[in-house]
Image (cartoon, rainbow, N blue to C red):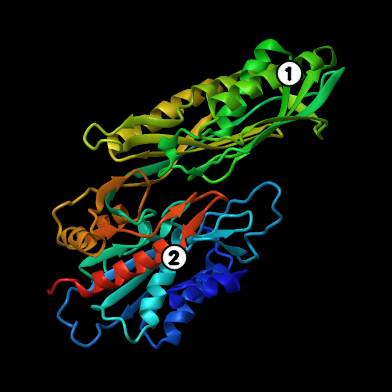
Amino acid sequence: MSQDVRSLQPGALWNYFADLNAIARPSKKEERVIEFAKKFGESLGLPTRVDAVGNVIINKPATPGMENRKAIVMQSHLDMVCQKNADTDFDFDTQGIQMLVDGDWVKAKGTTLGADNGIGVASIMAILASDSIPHPAIEALFTIDEETGMTGALELQPNQLHGKILLNLDTEEDTELTIGCAGGIDVTAAANYKTEEIPAQHKSYTLSVRGFKGGHSGMEIHLGRGNANKIMNRVLFNASSKFQIRIATIEGGGLRNAIPRESFSAVFVPEAQCSAFAAWINEINQVIRNEYASTDPDGGLVLKEGNKADLVMNVDDQKKLLASIYACPNGIYRMSPDIPGLVQSSNNLSKVSVGAGKINIQCLTRSAVDSEKNDLADAISSAFAILNAEVKYAGSYPGWTPRPGSDIVKIMAELHQEMYNEKANVMACHAGLECGIIGRHYPEMDMISFGPNILGAHSPEEKVQISSVNKFWNYLLETLKRIPAN
């Protein structure tokens, strides 16, 4: 399957992407891909270094005739989001991505593809390896841990880079030039609860919420897709008011930056109420399917008999848990009052884990306005006060303030019109890009982000458009030619 990808054009880019995807590279486990990038730079005879946190920086001098142009930083992140379908047998810690070509798209077999941000990494590698592409002096910056904390960008030291313009290759629509983004903060609620023996004459069930699309919790939060954790909680909350159900475990969602697609709970129901409970689940399943028919046509509930559990939650703790999750904000919190159609603040209730007397709930809160980000985090914290949870904030990173009049924005906007007879969409996005953080270290650096069409990032539906990669590649090469003089 990867051989089909290697035959695509531009050949160097796709071959480096296949090389990259052969290496396991989950966030926070980037040792192998760091070594891969380091050896790549060294094999070219280019000055290569790995900083204290694991970012890889490779320097390449300007090609003849380009020495008087401003030096540039080309930047992408090495890690990838690791999500798979429940029925896919795959180990992200040891296996390479199984890719396939489907018409004009490259996909993965039941997992995320890693086009976010592997296409950007591969593009930079192809330019570094080329002896025929004109370009100014380049500092290639390959950051680590972008997807789960932006650690690489946060720990980048102010004296590491000297480029005047930064090209971030991490945007997912080929008509967009991104010049601003939201900041974010991780919010985690943790609590203990009392457990009890399973009551007599109760029947065990496994309730699943599955089939929802999920996706990128920044770029796709405005699409109104179902959050499996909120849907599971809604069902359990309403079921507990109608039946004497007892919860043993809940496991839903995964990474903070992925809208949760699945949630699973183990519950016990009095035998006398089982028929009514099963009938009610069928009814609420149809309600949910109707509500999400447009955004998540395959989403719904599955109820099966039997599970393995020894203990259930204390009734009072169960009520507090369900009430607190119900009160937790999720999705869009506020739209931008200045930029039509742009989400300004949102929250993703990304993970709910309940079992063995412990509760762990994780959110990723985003906003283009730091004060509003903090306000939303406090609202979430207040919701979990119902549970008497300990709430912690971590990993806060700033947004990226747009500079629509900058030189690189003007150059690339004019170039897009010239090459494609189409006006580029110069915009800010609700995702978290590393530009805001890097800009904090290098406030004078001119920055822009762009990339090819990638759909379904952060979900097993992720795919990248082959024709769009070719368009992006040609646009990138022409941009390098037009970097202004010092």
Q: Residues within 10 Å of mark 1 (few under 14, many from 20)?
A: many
Give the labeled residue for mark 2: 119
Point out residue 114 in the picture as x, y percentages from the top left corner.
Answer: 51, 60
The residue sitting at 22% across, 53% down in the picture is 423
Point out residue 257 in the picture as x, y percentages from the top left corner.
Answer: 48, 45
The amino acid marked with disc number 2 is: Ile
Mark 2–mark 1 Cα distance, whole angstroms, equals 48 Å
Q: How many marks?
A: 2
Above or below residue 208? Residue 255 is below
The amino acid marked with disc number 1 is: Ile
Q: Which mark is residue 327?
A: none
Would residue 195 appear left or right of 176 to someone viewing this image? Answer: right
Residue 388 in sight from this viewpoint: no
Give the labeled residue for mark 1: 245
Give the camera-side residue of 252 and 134. Answer: 134
Point out residue 12 in the picture as x, y percentages from the top left corner.
Answer: 44, 78
The residue sitting at 41% across, 26% down in the picture is 379
